[in-house]
Amino acid sequence: MTTPFGRATTRQRRSTIDVAALVEVAADLLPILSTDTLDARLIDPHSSDPVITLEEGERRLRIDASELARAMERARIDNSDAALAQAITHWVLNRAATDLAAETSGLAILDWTDATRTTVCWRVAISRGDAIIAWTPSTLLDTARVDAVRAVAMTRSQSQPTTVIVDGSVAVWTSPTLALSTAVLTDPARMLTDMSSHGLTIRDTMFIVAPGRPVAAADSPAATRLCAGAADTGVTVPPHRLHTLGWR
Amino acid sequence: MTSDNTSAAHETVRAAYWLNAENRNDLADAIREACTFTISETLRLHLAAVLTELGVVSARERLWPAASTIVRRTNGWTDDVLPIRMSETEVAAALAIPHLSTTCRAALTGGRTQ
């Protein structure tokens, strides 16, 4: 199970995190994790309950060390220095994406519309280390600016590198960063060209989409069959509907 | 939007038959050959469904490899052993092919192959 702090590092149902140990690790680590845009710091390190703040662009996150420790306990993070350092690093890397980051490096990908995982929608996402962060527009941006960020992300996604393989009666596209594979769906015409240049000619093409996984294309019966036997959820989307999907 | 959750929508119960690449090729060849003869339309439809399944299984593995990887590791099977998901009717249609190879028939009746 993944958590805001990465994978659980203890098998106990709930760990016990020593707040003082957490503060000590954070004091060493936060300056290293800070960047040109991110100010990660510990406020009042010698008080009874110091505060950790992450400030980047318009985003502000402020949390008591004791509250962070409790969240790590629920996530079954071990109390060792190494586990705490790993958890803090994961948490900082997975912080919210700023409007500026979305504007300058955002990619359009498909994501689940909600937790029911029955429909998909477009999202702007950024890469940060190994993490892929879906962007939620701040309230500072008006609708026109949000639309502009999304349009640029769509264009940027169209030039992302992708590998296509034809396997049986199905074509499969994979990005070097697996979680970004759905970016290829920003250019369905290119995908149809990919298929024909690999000798796969299909009438009634359907794309098989499972956010975070490679993207497949097959004719409608094969696409239905592919999803029906899947160990996890996927949806089918016809090419002409891709650009009518909503944004989140 | 017209996307549909086909995993949930499809009510046919299909069991996994673990076939290696050779078994899958044998089965596909046998089905294609059987379809050149005069057979009932119902049998032809079931065999076509099995052929469709054989055509998508590798791609399904590329999209969702985790679950079958665990099964292969647990059983010590090689990477080319993949789960072919078929209904009882589809398996019966495949087994009705007289010239189906012995190894393929054994894989379908034994529930797994290596």
Image (cartoon, rainbow, N blue to C red):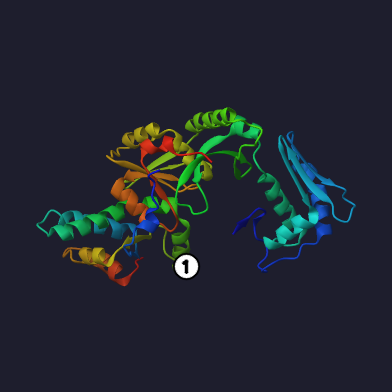
Density class for disc 1 (Cα within 10 Å; few <14, some 14-19, many ≥20) is few
Horizontal side of A217 relative to A34 (left or right) equals: left
The number of discs equals 1
Name the outermost residue toward the bottom: B110
The image position of residue A194, as x and y in percent, is 37, 35
Mark 1 element type = helix
Q: Residue B106's image quarter?
A: bottom left
Relative depth, front residue between B30 and A115: A115
Q: Give amino acid for label 1.
A: Thr
Subunit of label 1: B
Residue in view at x 68 percent, y 50 percent: A90
Q: Is residue A28 left or right of residue A231?
A: right
Q: Quadrant of the C terminus of chain A?
A: top right
> Considering depth in this image, is B23 or A227 the residue closer to the camera?
A227
Estimate the x, y position of residue A203 in percent, counting from the top left: 27, 39
Q: Is residue A188 above or below residue A208?
A: above
User: Can you say whether B44 is above or below A59 in the image?
Assistant: below
Which residue in the structure is indicated by mark 1? B74
Q: Answer with left or right where residue A6 lies relative to residue A216.
A: right
Q: Residue at x 50, y 29 (%)?
A: A155
> Which quadrant: the N terminus of chain A?
bottom right
Q: Quadrant of residue A12?
A: bottom right
Residue A208 in the image: x percent, y percent? 39, 46
Query: A213 or A50, which is in the foreground?
Result: A50
Answer whether residue A197 is visible to the viewer in this image: yes
